[in-house]
Image (tube, rainbow, N blue to C red):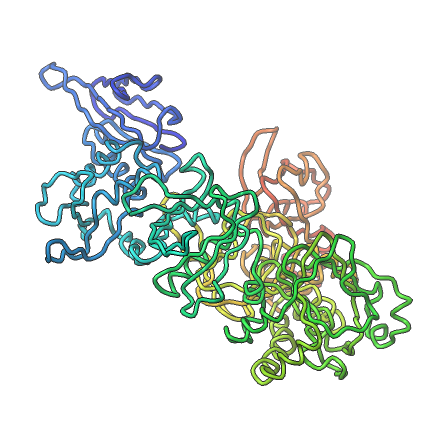
Amino acid sequence: MGQSITITNDTHKPVTAWLSKHGKPVRGWEVALQPGDTVSKEPSALEVGTKYKLVIRAQGKQGSMREWTQIFYAFKAKEGLLSFTVNVLTDMKRLRIFEIDYLLDQILPGIRIEDRVYHGKTYPRCFVANELITYMLLHQIGKDETDAVEKCRVLCECSIIEHVVTSNHTFENKYLFFRLRESHKMLEGRMQALEQDNFAASPRYRFHPRLGRKQDANKGIEGWLEKKSKLGLWQRRYFRFLTSEETKLGAHLAYFDGVTSLDPKGIIPADGIHMVEHYERSKQNRTFTIKIVQDHSHSGRELYLLRANSPEICNRWLNALKPYAKSLSQADVVERSALSFVMSAETMVKLSKLLKEVKYAKGDWICKRGERTTNFFLLKNGKMGMYIPARYTTEAARNAANQEAVPDIFYCAMTPVSFLGVESFFNAESKRSSALTSTSPSSASSSSATTPAADIVVGPIQKISCLAMEDSTMLKLGSEDIKLFMKEYNQEIKGKLYALLNSGIDKRISQVPFLKDIKPADMAKLKLGLHYRRLNEGQVLFYEGEAGSDFFIVYSGEMKIVHYDAKKDREIHLKTVRKADCFGEIALMLPGVPRTATVIATAPTLLLSLHNETFHSFLDIAKLDIQVVMRERIVNTFKKFHIPFFEAIPEESFHELAMKCKVETFEANEVIFKEGDDGDRFYIISFGKVSVRVDKKHVANLKQGNYFGEVALVVEDTPRTATCVTLAQTVLLSMSKDSFRGFFCRSSRSSSRC
């Protein structure tokens, strides 16, 4: 019910209270409070969703004992600490509000609102009682039929649910029509989420403010589909996705005879799904297949053929189930790559049919520097390593003989859905001074980007090498197929693809504050390690709390950045990012740092991403200092946090000041300095949290924007007066005493403060 529950006796009389379940007292929940007393209880003994009886007894006005009783379902509190007073509990209203709020979160997703017809009469915007009870039983919202019905009756008692004809009709597990009283205050903000999809005809997304991992997001997806039987007959079945929390069989897709059926006709285990794709023979694009991993099917079937009512519903099911597939179809690989931004759906289908699977064992070379190739490759699954010359210079690139004498070094990894050899689409035999590099990987999930290198001559000779880092599958388009494909689609894609991979990517990188000043020769190296990531509308890039390892640039599209407020139990919109915006640069300095927000595509979006390891490889190869590269971030920190020491400094001097700073990273529970140490540096928290301790006792927590250690800058030979320890992964900007004083003494506007 919460991390802690406190009860305060705010009356002038002694009070006793206790909880019971099934007529038996709950151990540890008998309390006796004198006036003004407060008691704290841990809720671990209470089972969420279970019925309890609360009894409060106090002395009345004339010495007689008065008793208040309330039966309620234990709820999962949305706040860490719950505080009640005796007067509040005896009034019962607040406890009832918490209970109703919890029940609505659980029950509303199972309500199918639609117009119903019975004996020729239409009842608008209602739902069927026994369909809701079936949903609650299958998803374990009700322990049994009686429990599920009683929970619905609680909502009826509060006038949230009412019968379509008689408002006082008892809720029963029968074919009865009920409706939501949409004007009820407890339903504010819930109806819109409840009606996002047509429940009866399409997969239904369970309403929950904290949709998290793919399994949680799919919890409650259900709808009618036709399944082709072994005899070739189409059978109408009601499909439901059940999570591992709701069934002993693990997460699976179950199909039933009807909406009120409790016993499934069959199940498709989620961890047994090999591939999900459109059925290519379906002319109406509303049929899809689920291929099962061998020896994993409960029914012995290796393929399920399913048909939806419309192409839109079919696509929703595909999007819901594809995250579980162990392998991508060829069409999926093409669709998830950056190619989808320059090709029509028809063109992508044509390309996917021409691709041929090629297997590579770990350690196999896909291509080597200096070889000639006219093939195009898309990585379907596995992992490839990109190797570049140790001295990756313009001179070396222009001289093949010199290149062969230069050893190759690992630069970055290529993951699905990366591609290389894209110059094959641009007539590989002709050399251009500003064409594409021969191995520019591009990705749609976590992949490497196809990238141009304006200062490297591109021809049929490979300028990098590519090695299988694990057993992998590539989709290959040979030279003859490329000619046939381009003969038909040259006009459609050639210009768009060339612009996407050349001027477009150059422009986006130049719009990133901390990358815009990189020299052209170094820019070519950086672009080799970029990844493309494609997202559909509504697709989540990452969730709050997930470990971060990539920095992102929005090439095109739009995304929203949101944060979940646990106290208010709602999603808070922080920012909208559009074309040329960037985010996540803290992951370049702190690999694995938890994301502080969730990012969701609000339109079809193409991102450029840079992995932490690739970024540091780039710094090593280009011989760049991270302090120099991150100079703009340091300047932005000065502007954003308004540090008193720097308020007198004009903004044009911030770049000089930034060069005096050092970027330091710390893991959680790492000591920055100890009490008594010599003080010689000043710190600003750019990211993370720091604990301040004096005599081993905690005295304060510092967060982003706070600073500490300033005494060391102005007082000679002063020991540290406290110990500072990081509470989480932290990025600090630090400045030495000498740098601080030297800068301020040279600053004419702040010399008086020196």
Q: Is residue 571 above or below residue 341?
A: above
Q: Is residue 468 above or below residue 376?
A: above
Residue at far front of view: 231
In what quadrant of the picture does the N terminus appear?
Answer: top left
Q: Percent x, y for residue 310?
A: 36, 64
Q: Foreground residue, 193 or 298?
A: 298
Q: Percent x, y for residue 477?
A: 67, 71
Q: In this view of the protein, can residue 148 be seen by the observer?
A: yes
Query: Does 347 sit left or right of 35 as displayed?
Result: right
Q: Foreground residue, 704 or 316?
A: 316
Q: Foreground residue, 104 or 677?
A: 104
Q: Quadrant of residue 652?
A: bottom right
Residue at 27% in and 17% down: 34
Q: In this view of the protein, can residue 748 be seen by the observer?
A: no
Q: Percent x, y for residue 204?
A: 35, 53
Q: Percent x, y for residue 396?
A: 85, 72
Query: Does 39 sit left or right of 358 as displayed?
Result: left
Residue at 31% in and 44% down: 105
Q: Quadrant of residue 103?
A: top left
